[in-house]
Amino acid sequence: MRDVTTAHPVQELDVQPTPLALLLLGRDADPRSERGVECPGDLPSPSDPDLVERARAAKEKLGEKVFVLGHHYQRDEVIQFADVTGDSFKLARDAAARPEAEYIVFCGVHFMAESADILTTEDQKVVLPDLAAGCSMADMATAEQVAECWDVLTEAGVAEQVVPVSYMNSSADIKAFTGRHGGTICTSSNAKRALEWAFEQGEKVLFLPDQHLGRNTAVRDMGMTLEDCVLYNPHKPNGGLTAEELRNAKMILWRGHCSVHGRFSVESVNDVRARIPGVNVLVHPECKHEVVAAADYVGSTEYIIKALEAAPAGSKWAIGTELNLVQRLANRFAAEDKEIVFLDKTVCFCSTMNRIDLPHLVWTLESLAEGTLVNRIEVDPETEKYAKLALERMLALP
């Protein structure tokens, strides 16, 4: 009988992981990417019963030297230590308003910490408790891809007519590109004002990186049609668009999206209406256009909070945004007999936002209290100069 074990000897392959693979595995660093890396040092055990007391003690020791920012999507265990809570831009502005704080600990994601560094003084140090807390949407538009897109617009003869508008949920590199090319930044609260300003400057808008916010604002809030919008796919030659399509378009939307808000569907809306008669459906404008069209109310995170604050007792709400916030609001308004549920039946947290947990926060605060600066987020001066210019244009909007 033939010995099959020796018939085809196995050859050892010298396979080296690519830089992207290392980033995704958390084993390499790229300061210009939202993809994070492992934190240096040993984190305390998540089962440590003294974590809350350790965080409190370290924060008290630091006193006014530290200012802790907590995004609305953070875990409750982290939010309890935040000096202020809010959306990404509100928090960055709050940090800039506290020049006496030496350390700004940003409990959010990478692009938010970058924005805080851009808007704070040179003496302040912005810290992200876990460097792997990134944003998949922000990663969908790299500086190289956007530069190539601008070349495509130039070759099509439309670049001079285009004003870039970038969502706050973008890297410092993209904000800097926007600043260099005469554009502005927007939030989900002021996207309409930003687009109105942009169309006063030019005939077309390149909207980065969230296609849904751009489309919803243009069509729902500004009266454009879906035909006025084209989708630029950075993974296709020329973005998958012809020169004629670019010339005819008013809104050139980047092919990016939020992994959380993108999961909500019209089926989710129909299902919750069937399960909860009389329910109000309230969604974030990062949701797909058809979901926004099927909802009763649409607005930013701050809008969602204010809407529920003003809602009458006994009202019913299905919310299409990140689950941590929805659960917090449900608990907050339960005493007022407001029924608040998550729009989708499947649980969905923002996985990268949830990387900021109590062990990471404790490690960060204790390190700072001992005089060791960890996980500092720094934007280089050239990038900061143009990113700040774009942010200042937004601040100057009427």
Image: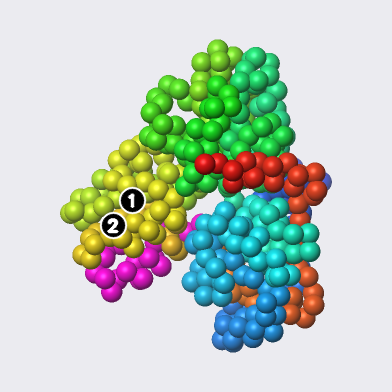
**Observer-nearest of 211 and 391:** 391
| First of labels 2, 1 by sequence position | 1
Q: Is residue 88 left or right of residue 276?
A: right
Q: Which residue is mark 1?
A: 282
Amino acid found under the numbered disc labelled 2: Trp
Contact flag, marks 2 and 1 (Cβ < 8 Å)? yes
- State the CA–CA distance, disc 2 to disc 1: 7 Å
Rendered view: 23 above or below 67: above
- The residue that appears at 41% across and 26% down in the rendered structure is 224
Question: What are the residue bounds of the magenta stretch?
Answer: 326-352
Amino acid found under the numbered disc labelled 1: Leu
Instruction: For residue 7, say whether it is visible.
Output: no
Q: Pointer 2: residues within 10 angstroms few (<14), some, or many (20+)?
A: many
Location of residue 300 in the rendering, given as x and y in whole percent from the top left corner? 44, 50
Magenta-span inclusion, residue 341: yes
Q: Which residue is mark 2?
A: 317
Location of residue 85 in the rendering, given as x and y in whole percent from the top left corner? 52, 65
Q: Is residue 77 left or right of residue 383?
A: left
Location of residue 100 in the rendering, given as x and y in whole percent from the top left corner? 71, 70
Magenta-span inclusion, residue 299: no
Q: Is residue 264 left or right of residue 277?
A: right
**Observer-nearest of 314 and 272:** 314
Residue 122 figure quarter: bottom right
Residue 241 figure quarter: top right
Instruction: For residue 274, say whether it is visible.
Output: yes
Q: Pointer 1: residues within 10 angstroms few (<14), some, or many (20+)?
A: many
- The residue that appears at 80% across and 44% down in the rendered structure is 382
Location of residue 171 in the rendering, given as x and y in whole percent from the top left corner? 66, 46
Rendered view: 182 above or below 347: above
**Observer-nearest of 59 and 272:** 59
